[in-house]
């Protein structure tokens, strides 16, 4: 069974509270999401494997550590996942970025695909799928399905706010995928919105409502 890590760092929790507030404007919402994404990426990358290399400092030769193993990729689920890319890229500037376009059908709440462009060597990378909201889990599950179909075997999901229903659905569909999340809220309402949540992440990020 996969790991679920609630990133309870005080800075993450403080910034998330500011984002939840209905009076938080688009600019602040965008900046806070980027800041939180960087802090969360620090946790997601905590266990990256290291290897020793020999280097020469201005004073002496020594052995020192660098990151080993597979290269990273970031895959935002459009639209709202875009708001998390720069935060992760601040820490991992050489990561390649793929995009998966999905929206929830307003009636059925099922994900509908409209775009998918992934790095050509996706099967050789550790991918971090980013999306602020994990509601029914349908979008995250569909995105991870696409990625696995392209041959990728190592996926981590990074979300901001989820709910027990979404966490359970992802764990059941993809038991090999670890989830990093800042908060697991109470429940989904009749419109499949997270309660208390923060509303529609895409609209708040891009000012479309
Ligand atoms: C939101 C959110 C997730 C999805 C979560 O996107 O960013 O992708 O809903 O819901 P789920 O877990 O029930 O699938 P939305 O479909 O509203 O698209 P948008 O980002 O373009 O607004
Ligand atoms: N998508 C969002 O943006 N917010 C929710 O609460 C659920 C789905």
Image (cartoon, rainbow, N blue to C red):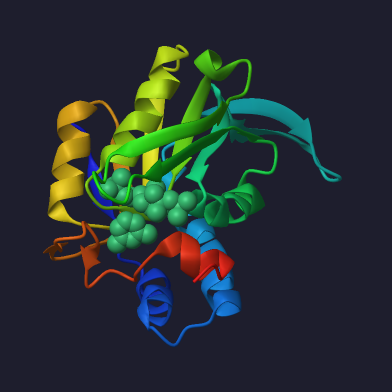
Tell me the quarter of the picture where residue 14 sits: bottom left
> Would residue 65 appear left or right of 61 to someone viewing this image?
left
Q: Nearer the viewer, residue 74 or 50?
A: 74
- Residue in the image at 56% along x and 78% along y: 28
Vertical order, 100 against 9 (above or below)? above
The location of residue 69, given as percent across then percent down, is 53, 22
The location of residue 94, given as percent across then percent down, is 69, 36
Q: Nearer the viewer, residue 32 or 201?
A: 201
Asked if residue 11 can be seen in this view, the reply is: yes
- Residue in the image at 26% along x and 26% along y: 176
> Would residue 31 appear left or right of 41 to someone viewing this image?
right
> Would residue 171 appear left or right of 140 to someone viewing this image?
left
Asked if residue 7 can be seen in this view, the reply is: no
Vertical order, 38 against 136 (above or below)? below
Quarter occupied by the N terminus: top left
The location of residue 137, given as percent across then percent down, is 25, 43
Tell me the quarter of the picture where residue 170 sits: top left
- Residue in the image at 55% along x and 37% along y: 74
**What is the number of callouts on the image?**
0
> Would residue 24 appear left or right of 21 to someone viewing this image?
right
């Amino acid at each position: 069974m996969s790991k679920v890590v609630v990133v309870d760092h005080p800075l993450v929790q403080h910034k998330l509270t500011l984002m939840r507030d209905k009076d938080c404007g688009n600019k602040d919402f965008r900046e806070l999401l980027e800041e939180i994404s960087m802090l969360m990426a620090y946790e997601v990358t905590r266990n990256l494997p290291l290897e020793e290399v020999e280097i020469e400092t201005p004073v002496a030769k020594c052995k020192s550590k660098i990151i080993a193993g597979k290269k990273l990729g970031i895959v935002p689920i459009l639209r709202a996942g875009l708001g998390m890319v720069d935060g992760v890229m601040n820490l991992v500037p050489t990561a390649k970025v793929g995009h998966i376009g999905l929206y929830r059908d307003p009636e059925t709440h099922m994900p509908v695909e409209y775009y998918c462009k992934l790095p050509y060597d996706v099967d050789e990378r550790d991918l971090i799928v980013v999306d602020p909201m994990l509601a029914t889990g349908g979008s995250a599950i569909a995105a991870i399905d696409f990625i696995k179909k392209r041959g990728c075997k190592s996926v981590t999901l990074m979300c901001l706010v989820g709910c027990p229903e979404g966490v359970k659905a992802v764990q059941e569909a993809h038991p090999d995928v670890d989830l990093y999340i800042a908060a697991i809220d109470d429940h989904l309402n009749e419109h499949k919105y997270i309660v208390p949540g923060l509303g529609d992440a895409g609209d708040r990020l891009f000012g479309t409502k």
